[in-house]
Image (spheres, rainbow, N blue to C red):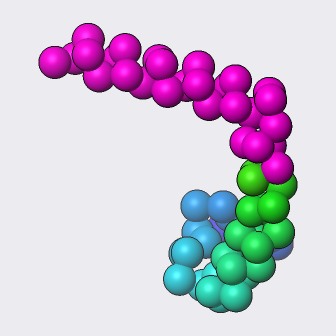
Amino acid sequence: MKKKNCYDVNDVNSAEIPEFVYESLARSLLPVIQKYYESDEGKRAFAEWKEKKEAAAKGST
């Protein structure tokens, strides 16, 4: 049997990742995400996404 030298992505349990890692990641990403959605490009992309979502919802009803 081959010995594992590194972590297999499928073997990692989310419970093994400390909560502070998630919080740190969220705190670092939030300002970037907010800046994008406040920009003209972000507003345009959000409007397009929202239209597609509403059209899909109407089509499935």
Placement of the C terminus among the 4 image quadrants: top left
* Image quadrant in which the N terminus is located: bottom right
Residue that lies at the very extreme toward the left in this rendered image: 61
Q: Quadrant of residue 2?
A: bottom right
Count of numbered badges drawn on the protein: 0
Left or right placement of residue 49 versus residue 36 in this view: left
- Residues 39 and 15: in front is 39
Q: In this view, does 12 lie above or below 9?
A: below
Give x and y (percent) for residue 18.
65, 88
30 is higher (above) or lower (below) than 44: below
Residue 22 covered by magenta stretch: no
Magenta stretch, main secondary structure, is helix
Residue sitting at x 82%, y 69%: 28
* Camera sees residue 24: yes
Q: Residue at x 75, y 53 (%)?
A: 34
Q: Can residue 2 be seen in this view?
A: no
Q: Which residue corresponds to the image point at 81% horizontal and 61% vertical from the top-left?
A: 31
Residue 8 x %, y %: 68, 64
Vertical comparison of 32 with 51: above or below: below
Q: Give the range drawn in magenta.
A: 35-61
